[in-house]
Image (spheres, rainbow, N blue to C red):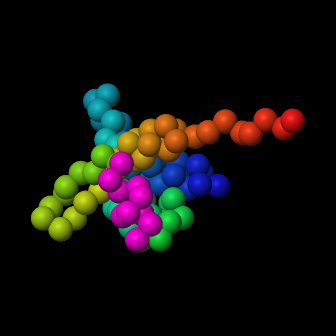
Amino acid sequence: MLENLLLASATQGLSHDDDIVVDRILPLAEVERLLDLSHSTFHRAVRPTLPVIRLSARRLGVRASDLRRWQAARLQAPAQAD
């Protein structure tokens, strides 16, 4: 379900114009929601490990592609049953 939310969210911001792909920038609040994390958990445990873009003096965001890469890097193989 999270993959579908992230994929839907990410593809809304993509456009193709002269072979240039624009990657959607997700506000940090949306990233928190997509990861299903509280504000404090996100800022304590996740935010320091994500590449964040400063959009203005008070606004930060994360590229959808960076969030997908961050998730993929943290995937673990399922535990093997004995």
Q: Is residue 14 magenta?
A: no
Q: Is residue 50 above or below residue 37?
A: above
Query: Can you tell which quarter of the image residue 43 is in?
Result: bottom left
Q: Residue at point 35% right, 56% down?
A: 47
Main SS class of the magenta portion in the image: helix
The C terminus sits in image quarter: top right
Residue 12, given in percent of the width and then of the height, sits at 44, 52
Q: Is residue 41 magenta?
A: yes
Q: Residue at point 30% right, 46% down?
A: 51
Residue 7, given in percent of the width and then of the height, sits at 52, 48
Q: Residue furthest left?
A: 57
The N terminus sits in image quarter: bottom right
Q: Is residue 6 above or below residue 65?
A: below
Residue 70, given in percent of the width and then of the height, sits at 44, 43
Q: Residue furthest bottom?
A: 39
Give the magenta part as a residue range: 40-49
- The reply to whether residue 14 is visible in this rendering is no
Front-most of residues 43 and 18: 43
Q: How many marks?
A: 0
Query: Seen in the image, is 39 located left or right of residue 51?
Result: right
Query: Seen in the image, is 74 located left or right of residue 1?
Result: left
Q: Residue at point 40% right, 71% down?
A: 40
Q: Residue furthest front?
A: 82
Query: Seen in the image, is 78 located left or right of residue 28?
Result: right
